[in-house]
Image: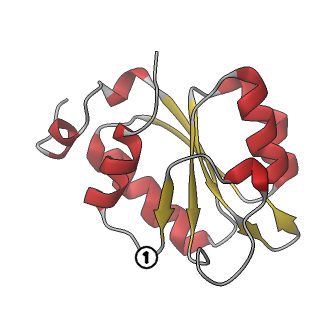
Amino acid sequence: METDLSKKLRFEPRHYSVLVLEDEPLIAIDLEHMLRQLGFTTITLVGTVERALATIDAYDLAILDVSLRNGTSAPVAEALRSKGAPFIVSTGYIDTGPIPSALKVQPFLRKPFSIEDLALSLNQLSLP
């Protein structure tokens, strides 16, 4: 089912599965809601690097929070890059601290963000 918001994307979102690595539950749920509004139907939320790495092969793209409770999402970014999967980096700390090099070249989604910001970031990805 196409929504008006799904028209903001240059691709058909229902054909892509999304892995979200976010350790703040309210942010994760809000992000999932935005992705569903954009037309994505297969979305998985995980809160740790270990859970993300355990399921990484099942997804077409990912959204990674930079700063997690026990480190950063850099290991997941490296694994995604090695498999050729696109990802977006989400952070509220662009200006306040060093970003791991594995996370520097991807589109950034600066927190707090709107659904329009999310759509713009998703449109920057190279999707098959």
Q: Work out whether residue 112 or residue 100 is closer to the camera in this orientation and state it.
A: 100
Front one among 95 and 78:
95
Q: What residue is rendered at 11% in x and 43% in y?
A: 4
Residue 42: percent from left, percent from top: 48, 33
Q: Which residue is mark 1?
A: 112
Q: Position of residue 88 (x, y in %)?
A: 54, 48
Q: What residue sits 77% from the left and 69% below the top?
A: 68
Q: Find residue 40 and report its horizontal and vertical position in percent.
A: 38, 36
Left or right, residue 14 beside residue 111: left
Q: Secondary structure at mark 1?
A: loop
Q: Is residue 52 above or below residue 66?
A: above
Q: Mark 1: give few (<14), some (14-19) or many (20+) Cα within 10 Å.
A: few
Q: In the drawing, does residue 45 fall left or right of residue 17?
A: right
Q: Quadrant of residue 116?
A: bottom left
* Residue 74 versus residue 81 in the image, above or below: below
Q: Residue at x 18, y 46 (%)?
A: 5
User: Does 17 sit above or below residue 128?
Assistant: below
For this view, does 21 lie left or right of residue 114?
Answer: right
- Please state which amino acid type lies under the numbered disc 1: Pro
Label total for image: 1
Q: In the displayed structure, would residue 1 be above or below residue 101?
A: above
